[in-house]
Image (cartoon, helix red, strand yellow):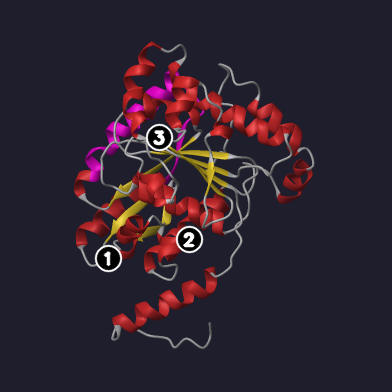
Amino acid sequence: MSAIPLMDETTPLAAELAVDARRRIELAGRRFPPPWQTRVFTVANQKGGVGKTTTTVNLAAALAKAGLKVLVIDNDPQGNASTALGIEHHSGVPSTYDILINDVPISEVIQESDVIPGLYCVPATIDLSGAEIELVSVVARENRLRNALAAYLKERSRDGQPRIDYVFVDCPPSLGLLTVNAFVTAREVLIPIQCEYYALEGLSQLLNNINLIRAHLNPALHVSTILLTMFDGRTNLAHQVAEEVREHFPDQTLHTSIPRSVRISEAPSYGQTVLTYDAGSSGALAYLEAAREIAKRGALPPETSVDQAVDESSTQEQSVDQELGEASTEAPEVEGANR
């Protein structure tokens, strides 16, 4: 690190390269702390094109590369998350649709990434586009995904398999039954916000919908993380949007913002995340830093000391059964850490 020369604003390009070089050294081979229990995120924003799927797959890849077990549930009929992770999702492949409609266990649908060990995906196929209509007449339709996930995590614990540390549910840009299922499944909401004016317009409506879900279906749901995406530091607008979001959501907004990056946009066309497509790019480094922030936030139970956390680790097996309970109509079985 000390061998990298210091640069100033008189050499902006060299200064940026020096900063990226330091970030690469700092993040290379870094292991992130596991959460004190499985954290389930719904990645949602009713506005399209803000980077929901890109954020989902790249955060998942960053956490998995840092030694954690991560599951991505592709709940969007477009199946873009499955594409970016290089997971088969053509018609006929067992998918999220089979879980929601046909009661197929997640263990029969899940696929592991060939590139990143510890990264798993439940793919989405085009069949999922009809699930909104088919779910209308299904009993307890809002709880289908939650119950399936709870049963899968409990099955892993019972079989002695490593615990899933993070679950990310990628949502379509709407508030249909697919998104409602995702909100009921999770405890935490991660909102990617594009650093543009229109992105702020839809945020209040999204928060109102989250409050409705909390009031009627999932009292534990809360917005825990906001990530600024497509940040262009050369424009005043990007800085103004970032300042406004940080002012209103100081605790939820990550310090790291994701820059506009050609590498991030190119990666899905090769069936990859930016972490595997160009691990040294500014976009990959930004997602690694964002993942590190998320991991640090969830490393310890709320209001619990390090010593208490060590004591509690000995009873982890018992707590998993208590948290998950039976896949029924109780409060969300999978808990994430409160902030």
| Amino acid, disc 1 | Gly
Residue 249: horizontal and vertical position, in percent?
38, 45
Would you say residue 336 is visible in this rendering?
yes
Q: Main secondary structure of the magenta part?
A: helix
Residue 181 x/y as whole percent:
43, 26
Mark number, residue 233: 1
- Would you say 227 lies left or right of 162 here? left
Q: Is residue 149 above or below residue 34?
A: above
> 121 and 46: which one is in front?
121
**Element type where label 3 sits in the image:** loop
Q: Residue at x 29, y 57 (%)?
A: 230
Q: Which residue is mark 2?
A: 288
Q: What mark, if any, has residue 101 been given in the picture?
A: none
Q: Earlier in the sequence, mark 3 or mark 2?
A: 3
* Secondary element at tag 1: loop
Discs 1/3, front: 3
Are there few (<14), some (14-19), or many (20+) residues within 10 Å of tag 2?
many
Q: Which residues are magenta?
A: 199-226
Q: Which amino acid is tagged 2?
A: Leu
Image coordinates for residue 75, horizontal then vertical, percent: 40, 34
Q: Gap between marks 1 and 3, in whole Å?
A: 32 Å
Q: Quadrant of the C terminus?
A: top right
Q: Which residue is mark 3?
A: 75
Q: Residue furthest front?
A: 92
| Earlier-in-chain disc, 1 versus 3 | 3
Q: Quadrant of residue 126?
A: top left
Dot 2 or dot 1: first in sequence order is 1
Q: Residue at x 34, y 60 (%)?
A: 264
